[in-house]
């Protein structure tokens, strides 16, 4: 190429040799970058080059991984809910730092806050801690973090308390405050009767579809995606629930906008938070004291009555949807009256 052609090429545009990137990225380009093709020790999940790992980034990656792994919808909802509790605490106590990866001192302060300020039960606190701890354990296994803030932080010891159950008299009071001549009253009566008859979790109950109810056989399917164990199961209900459902399903057929069985006045589905609050409201309206009126108390009531009537913990495990016998055995151990009765029978036949 002669000098004339070279000059004409240079005139076509101004040559620019600077990197038009943020300064924070240029600061990473030190001589050490060229020393090793891959710095394993300082990798920290490949985030060093592309910015600091935040709590939001970590949670989003964990959520996506668990979702891809087939986690149940209810489990994913719990991840979001429990992480929200941690974020709220950090925002109130460490303003402006609620997106930073916490250390163990923050986790310990959170536990203290839940115990002393929110006055939560140790079992409730442990549920939240397990969810968040699982995320950090996953981050360690993926080499995203090098240390978990839960290291040397133990879960709280939970005393084994007796299960609360609804008595027959209290059950009758609950139904007495349900006006069966109104949609809300009928729906509330169906929900209470359904929970007491089946022992399903409130989330499972409110995800049941109307077409999954078999009125003739008094049975209903709990789908795998709705179940905590991710296994489908069939549960059963009594004649009272059957009669209430027959009337409610007639309304549902004409007014439902979605397949969900339990709907509001506009034909839209209800969620588990609403269900829990609604049942608590019914308990207050019925002036029931001495026992917490909640969906989980209904579940305990069903399990306790079932064990007392059948003495069969193995079928109870299937009905409740437990993956092991550990929880079911607690119902068996609580039933001390039956143990005494069985012992007396044993002695009579000795």
Image: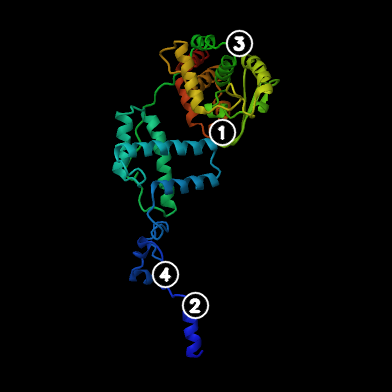
Label 4 secondary element: loop
* Residue drawn at x 44%, y 35% as measured from the top left: 81
Front disc: 3 or 4: 3
Seen from the viewer's position, the closer of residues 237 and 113 is 113
Between marks 4 and 1 in the image, the one whose residue lies nearer the viewer? 4
Q: Are marks 2 and 1 in contact (CB under 8 Å)?
A: no
For image coordinates 42% across by 59% down, the residue present is 46
Give whichever of discs 2 and 4 has the lower sequence position.
2
* Badge 1 density bin: few <14, some 14–19, many ≥20, Cα 10 Å: many
Give the CA distance from mark 2 to mark 1: 68 Å
| Mark toward the viewer: 2 or 1 | 2
Alpha carbon separation for disc pair 1 and 3: 32 Å
Secondary structure under badge 3?
loop
Residue at label 4? 37
* Mark in the foreground, 3 or 2: 2
Say how the picture is coloured: rainbow
Residues at marks 3 and 2, CA–CA distance in whole angstroms: 85 Å
Distance, label 3 to label 4, CA atoms, is 75 Å
The residue that mark 2 highlights is 12
Which circle's residue, 3 or 2, is located before the other in the chain? 2
Of labels 2 and 4, the one closer to you: 2
Lower position in the chain sequence, tag 1 or tag 3 = 3
Relative to residue 95, is residue 327 depicted above or below?
above
Of badges 1 and 3, the one in the foreground is: 3
Question: Which numbered circle lies on residue 181?
Answer: 3
Neighbor class of circle 3 (other Cα within 10 Å; few <14, some 14-19, many 20+) is few
Q: For marks 4 and 1, give the CA distance.
A: 47 Å
Mark 2 nearby-residue class (10 Å; few <14, some 14–19, many ≥20): few
Secondary structure of the residue carrying numbered label 1: loop
Q: Which residue is mark 1?
A: 227
């Amino acid at each position: 190429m002669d000098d004339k052609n070279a000059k004409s090429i240079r005139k076509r545009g101004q040559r620019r040799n600077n990197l038009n990137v943020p300064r924070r990225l240029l600061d990473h380009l030190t001589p050490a970058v060229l020393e090793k093709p891959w710095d394993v020790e300082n990798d920290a999940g490949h985030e060093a080059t592309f910015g600091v790992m935040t709590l939001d980034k970590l949670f989003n990656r964990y959520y996506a991984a668990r979702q891809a792994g087939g986690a149940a919808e209810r489990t994913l909802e719990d991840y979001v809910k429990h992480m929200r509790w941690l974020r709220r605490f950090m925002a109130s106590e460490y303003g402006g730092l609620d997106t930073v990866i916490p250390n163990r001192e923050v986790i310990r302060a959170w536990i203290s806050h839940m115990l002393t300020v929110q006055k939560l039960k140790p079992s409730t606190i442990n549920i939240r801690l397990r969810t968040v701890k699982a995320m950090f354990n996953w981050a360690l296994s993926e080499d995203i973090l090098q240390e978990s803030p839960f290291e040397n932080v133990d879960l709280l010891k939970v005393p084994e308390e007796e299960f609360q159950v609804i008595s027959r008299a209290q059950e009758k009071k609950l139904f007495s405050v349900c006006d069966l001549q109104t949609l809300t009253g009928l729906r509330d009566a169906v929900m209470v009767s359904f929970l007491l008859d089946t022992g399903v979790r409130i989330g499972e109950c409110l995800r049941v579809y109307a077409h999954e109810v078999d009125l003739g056989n008094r049975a209903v399917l709990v789908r795998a995606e709705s179940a905590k164990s991710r296994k489908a199961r069939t549960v059963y209900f009594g004649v009272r629930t059957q009669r209430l459902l027959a009337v409610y399903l007639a309304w549902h057929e004409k007014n439902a906008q979605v397949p969900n069985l339990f709907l509001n006045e506009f034909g839209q589905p209800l969620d588990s938070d609403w269900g829990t609050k609604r049942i608590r409201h019914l308990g207050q309206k019925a002036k029931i004291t001495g026992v917490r009126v909640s969906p989980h108390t209904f579940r305990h009531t069903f399990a306790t009555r079932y064990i007392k009537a059948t003495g069969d913990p193995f079928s109870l495990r299937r009905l409740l949807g437990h993956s092991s016998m550990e929880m079911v055995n607690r119902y068996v151990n609580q039933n001390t009256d039956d143990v005494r009765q069985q012992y007396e029978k044993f002695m009579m036949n000795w």
